[in-house]
Amino acid sequence: MRDLAKYQGIIPAFYACYDENGKVSRERTKALALHLLKKGVKGVYVGGSSGECIYQGVQERKEILEAVMEVAKGKMTVIAHVACNNTADSCELAAHAESLGVDAIASIPPIYFRLPDHAIAQYWNDISAAAPNTDFIIYNIPQLAGVALTLPLFKEMLKNPRVVGVKNSSMPVQDIQMFKMAGGEDHVVFNGPDEQLISGLAMGADGGIGGTYGVMPELYIKMFDLCKAGDYTTARNIQNDVDKIIYAMCECKGNLYAVMKEIIKLREGLDIGSVRKPLAALVPEDAPQVNKCKVMIDEAIAKYC
Ligand SMILES: CC(=O)N[C@H](C=O)[C@@H](O)[C@H](O)[C@H](O)CO
Ligand SMILES: CC(=O)C(=O)O
């Protein structure tokens, strides 16, 4: 049996850390990794949507992962998202991630062209073969990727012994149960949509990987612990507050990641820069709403943690 305990918990999707000129910052990347480590998260998911991976080059993505590993190796689980939408670059990142000793690599399917299942399986298996000693996690996010992980495709992927599970970001919570039942005890499923973490856990998710965990990890860790202890009533109260916070953060003109980075700066004194174009940076008119969200987070943490 493999070690699945390292995947059972709250795993924030790591944010891209830039300097004042918008360049990838190793120092800020290390500072964010240390910050999350101190908050007690189970691990980090590096280079995903929240990491702005689709706006970064291969070399930048290597640098970010190297900086995270300097801080995290042996102290928390590191899952490296390596997909680049072309097989060669993805394989290069996969091999690099394995050389650093990550716990797992992960990949979305190829986007833009809606490729058939057999081509997606080939893409994932090629990437996995470039990291032959590393667990592989399928990232299912059909609303953005344009293609969904079907049950037949998942069953095909289960023939690859490195496939350890699915990060499921489709909206039906039922999908978590479906992948959990197909994968059995030897595989994990992560809840994707932060707005329904407690439902995903109720349906059998082993842990959660989420884009908004990094801005309020305390609340997600608390929800996870309460669900494990069977107290879904208190967990639901937190989930309700968390969802209000997410909706409020989405009301800004600046992109959600820009909002969250600003809140981290306000709450924690940690400056990790802004977002990369074409994502919209904050505008001055966003300030009151950002501050309102900050206060909502302060209050929820004071109330529940
Ligand atoms: C579509 C998307 O980006 N989904 C993320 C990953 O599953 C979530 O973690 C969201 O960031 C989160 O649920 C906020 O809407
Ligand atoms: C949000 C998320 O899980 C990601 O960054 O991929």
Image: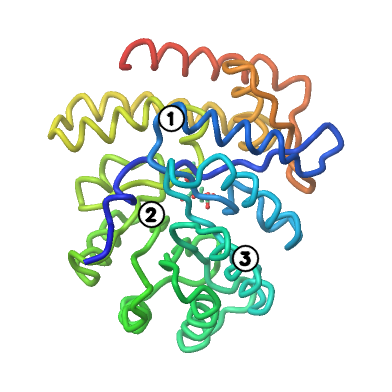
Viewer-nearest residue: 49 or 206? 206
Give the residue at x 57% y 79%: 114
What is the distance, in whole Å, between disc 3 and disc 1 at their CAs?
A: 28 Å
Q: Earlier in the sequence, mark 2 or mark 3?
A: 3
Query: Which image quarter: residue 197?
Result: top left
Residue tagged 2: 171
Viewer-nearest residue: 20 or 146? 20
Height in image: 295 above or below 101?
A: above
Height in image: 131 above or below 76?
A: below
- State whether label 3 is within 8 Å of ligand 2: no
- Say which amino acid is labelled 3: His
Label 3: state its secondary structure: helix
Which label belongs to residue 96?
3
Give the residue at x 27% y 40%: 198
Task: Tell me the mark number nearer the camera, choosing from 2 and 1.
Answer: 1
Residue 132: x and y, percent? 47, 76
Residue 195: x and y, percent? 39, 39
Viewer-nearest residue: 245 or 23? 23
